Amino acid sequence: MDDKGFAILGGGMGGFGAANQLHELGIRPKLYDSRPRPGGLTSSFDFGDKFIFDEGVHISFTKSERVREVFARSVEGRFETGNVYCNNYWKGHWIKHPAQVNLHGLPTDLVVDCIKDFVAASQIKEPKINNYEDWLLATFGPTFANTFPMVYTRKYHTTDAANMTTDWLGPRLYRPDLDEVLRGALAHEPLDVFYVNEFRYPTEGGFEGFMRGLFPKADVHNNHEVTRIDMRERRLQFRNGRSASFTKLISSIPLPKLVPLIADAPRDVQDAAARLACSQAVVVNIGLNRPVVTKPQWSYFYDEDIPFARISYRANLSPNAVPPGCGAFQAEIYFSDKYRPMTGKPEHWIEPTIDAMIRCGLVADRGEVIHQSAIWIPFGNVIFDHDRRPALETVHGFLDDVGIAYCGRFGVWGYIWTDAAFLSGEKAARRAAGRMDADHEAA
C-alpha cells in the first residue's frame, strides 16, 4: 500500500481521521507532525510516577457507531464506561450541572431572583438577539445570566458574552421551561438534561489510547514542522531542513498558522486568518497521596477569584490514571492572545491552583500533593467572536481554491468534539480523493 502522493499535516484526531479513511481506500498517506510523537490535542502524558494526564479533559460520548467501533478497536475493546455526572461550584456551593435546573441549595434570595427574572424574560416575545449576551438575557434573565454563564464565558472564552455570536451553542447550553426551573429549585437534582450521557475512556494509557491503533494507518514523520507550502510546485519545506512533494494535501494545522506558510497567500487572506481567535490553556495537574472520593467526572467553577474554569477527576475516568491509593485533578486556566494574554510561565499557575483547590475544599493542605505539573496548550478552543464568520469564509474559500482540504477543530475552526474532528478528517480525505459518496457523507 503506497501513499499515492497524499500528505497530511497534523497528527491529531482530524489528521488520523483522514489517514483512517485513506487507508480504507487503499492509500497509506504520509503524515507530518511537528511534535516528537503523534496525538495532537488528544495526547496523554505519563510522568513516570504512574500519574497519567491528558491535554485537558477528554472523553468519548459519540453516537456515531463508526467512530465507536474505530475507537474500540484501537484499544482492543479495553475501555471504561460510565454515566456522565458533572457539577458546579459557586461561592462555597456545589450544585449539579446544568445550574439553570439545579438551583436548589443556593441562597434563597438568589433563587427567587433567578426565577422572577426567568419568568419576566419568558414574557418577551421575539427578543432581539445580536450576540451571546442578548441570548443569555433573553433565555434566563439578568440574575442567572450575570451570576453564572456570563462569568464563565469570561473565564473559558476569555472575552465578554456581548463579543460572541450564538452559532456555537448547539446543545451545549440547555434552555429549560418554567416547570423544569421550579422543580430544580424545589428538589435536589430531579432532572437529567445534560447533553452528554454515557461516556467511554481507555482503561489504560489515557485518552490517547483511542488513537494509538490509528497510528499505523499512515507513514508518520514526527519532528517535521512545516515552514513553507508551495502549491504550484506541490512541495513542503520543514524546519529540520527536509522537503517532500505531494499531489494531494490535507491539513489540520490551525488556520492562523497554516495560511502564512502558503507561498503567495494573498494579503487579505493572511489578514483574515490573523483575525481568527482561539483560547490557549495552562493545564495544571495535581496528584494527591490519597483517593479523591467524588461523583463527578468534572466540575465548572464560576468564581472569578478562582483561576481555573474547570477541573476533571482523573480516577473517575479510569482508575488506572492514578497510582493505587492516590487521586488526581486536572485544572484548566484559559488565556488568549487577542483578549487575555497569558502572564508568567505555565508552572507559575501551579501554586495559585493549589491555593484555590484548598479554598474549595478539594485539597486539605499542600502536604497531600505528591505530583504537580503544568502543560501549555497554545490552541485550546475556538472563540466565536464577531470576526470569526467573515474571516473564516475568506480563509476557507482560499483553501478550497488552492486545493488544500482542511479538517480537525482548528482546520474547520469550529467548536467540535473528538468524534466530529475524526469525522471531519474522513470527510476531508474523501474530498481530496474525490470520493464524496452519500453513505460516507451521512456518517
Image: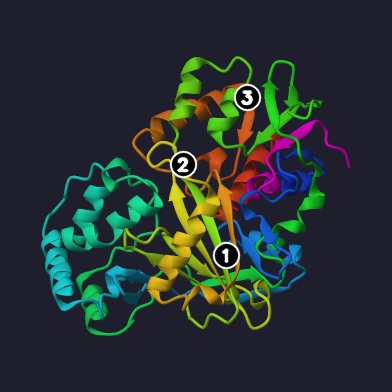
Q: Quick check: is 8 in the magenta stretch?
A: yes
Q: Secondary structure at mark 3?
A: helix
Q: Position of residue 172 (x, y in %)?
A: 39, 59
Query: Amino acid type of disc 2?
Result: Cys
Q: Nearer the viewer, residue 83 or 55?
A: 55
> Label 1 neighbourhood size at 10 Å, few (<14), some (14-19), many (20+)?
many
Q: Is residue 5 left or right of residue 130?
A: right
Query: In the rendered structure, are the residues bearing label 3 and label 2 in contact, judged by CB atoms less than 8 Å apart?
Result: no
The residue beneath circle 1 is 59
Cα distance between the residues tagged 3 and 2: 19 Å
Q: Amino acid at mark 3?
A: Leu
Dot in front, 1 or 2: 2
Write down the region rendered in magenta. 1-17
Q: CA distance from mark 1 to mark 3?
A: 33 Å
- Asked whether residue 13 is in view, the answer is yes
Magenta highlight on residue 248: no
Q: Which residue is mark 3?
A: 261
The residue positioned 62% from the left and 60% from the top of the image is 54
- In this picture, residue 275 sits left or right of residue 399: left
**Residue type indicated by callout 1:** Ile
Task: Specify the quadrant that holds the N terminus.
Answer: top right
